[in-house]
Amino acid sequence: MASVSLHAIVLRRRDLGETDRIVTLLSQESGKLDAVAKGARKPGSKSSGASELFTLSHIQLAEGRRLGIVTQWLVLDAFTRIRAELGLLARASYLCELTDKLVDDGEPCGEVYDLLRGALSLLEIGHGHPDTVVHAYELRLLEERGYAPALGCCVRCGKEWKGSPAAFSPMAGGLLCRACRGGVEATVMVRPATIQTMHTLKSGELTELGAMEWKPGVAAEVEACLNGCVRVRCERDIRSARFLEMVRGTEV
Amino acid sequence: MLAYARPLARLIGELEKLPGIGPKSAQRVAYHILRMPKSAALALAEAIAEVQEAVRFCSVCFNFSEDEVCSICRDPRRNKTTICVVAEPRDLIAIEKTGEHRGLYHVLHGVISPQDGIMPEQLRIRELLQRLDQSETAEVIVATNPTVEGDATALYLSKLLKPLGIKVTRLAHGLPLGADLDYADQATIISALQWRREM
Ligand SMILES: [Zn+2]
Ligand SMILES: [Zn+2]
């Protein structure tokens, strides 16, 4: 029987029968795929811990009748710190769900895998503010999927942005100059620091973003812009976003 | 279904809706019921009707109960200062069978699941808070499963209850008793290491 070796992160899982699970994996080698984790709901089974959300494993996938069957799990990171902090757990859930909704089964996406693995690792080691990781991931995932918002110039007429407060429209796909702003629905007025911050989040070295400082008011604006962009691109609701919003509300 | 007499087809159809019962088992059970003495079949039908009529939630702990307040909550020998919080009634039964927990329970009827959109307000958490407000509870034991959803629920409860001066503990997770260390997955071993304790 054909068997492949994959590096994969568990994005989602659901129960199958009495003791099994179906896991949605994002793999480095074959993109997103569903597979069966046999006995995952039996205590002490090899696959019970490994098939948990977020877990990064080196797996062996055997051909099954309809779905592949994971025959071996070597856990590379169980992200235990993420699972021990509500704020991190909420953010990691959101990143995985967002990825699941923006990536189609089977399309090659090694870059997205690297991005997600990097983002989860940064959350796990507590590198900077966790929302820095979330927003950098949102921007980079959108860019990877070809949906990056225009931040350097007006999305309509191409006029270069020169550092003044500007309008941002998730629907139009980025910044709008004064002349093009009229009549476009759902625009957010943002301060220059917000646009600068989004630039840095999108292009800065991911591992160096931890030192990034959030100026007052900028976090809320970045969140509003990116929530809007994500909502425009996802046909379905990101359920974890509601939970994340609630958790953010309890943080000071 | 054409070959079945109509009432038999109906019974098989109803049985098939039950969890873990496929068409084959439904057919077998239906034939079994058909061959039962009439009194036994009626007893089964009555039991099904009664369970819907007579079982409700205990108004204190939200376990299934025949009365307004369940027998555990009414028992004067139970330790009123400790409440064990479980996700489902079947988890309560599992713990109760051990006889180890002498305190009370609280059934949430679910766990927080961000990806499924299950939020705290959909669980019996408000009722737990009201209960803690009116009692002398010193410790809440969170007995949710060691899954991400179980973690989310435990972390949320701990964040909510600690400021009230209540000790919040969680069931340990790690190696199952009698298991081979060699056979356990790494996630379980990591967890067992983190939850280790001094001997
Ligand atoms: Zn313009
Ligand atoms: Zn009760």
Image: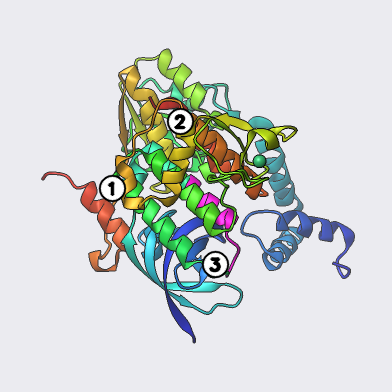
Q: Is residue B140 left or right of residue A40?
A: left
| Mark with earlier residue (3, 2) | 3
Q: Are the residues under marks 2 and 1 on the same chain?
A: yes
Nearer to the camera, A40 or B62: A40
Which residue lies most toward the left here?
B199
The answer to whether marks 3 and 2 mark residues whose Cβ atoms lie closer than 8 Å is no
Q: Is residue A80 visible?
A: no
Q: Secondary structure at mark 1?
A: helix
Magenta highlight on residue A15:
no
Q: Which residues are magenta?
A: A94-106
Identity, as a three-letter code, of the amino acid under mark 2: Val
Dominant SS in magenta: helix
Residue B158 visible somewhere in the drawing: yes
Identify residue for label 2.
A218
What residue is at 44 percent from the left and 68 percent from the top?
A28
Callouts 3 and 2 in the same chain: yes
In this rendering, the label closer to the viewer, 2 or 1 = 2
According to the image, label 3 marks what residue?
Answer: A33
Residue B153 percent across, percent down from the top left = 44, 37
- Distance in Å between CA atoms under marks 3 and 2: 37 Å
Give the camera-side residue of A234 and B18.
A234
- Residue A85: where, in percent of width, then height? 35, 39
Tag 1: amino acid: Ile
Which element is circle 3 on? Answer: strand
Check whether the beta carbons of the residues at disc 2 and disc 1 lie within 8 A of each other: no
The quarter of the picture where the N terminus of chain B appears is: bottom right
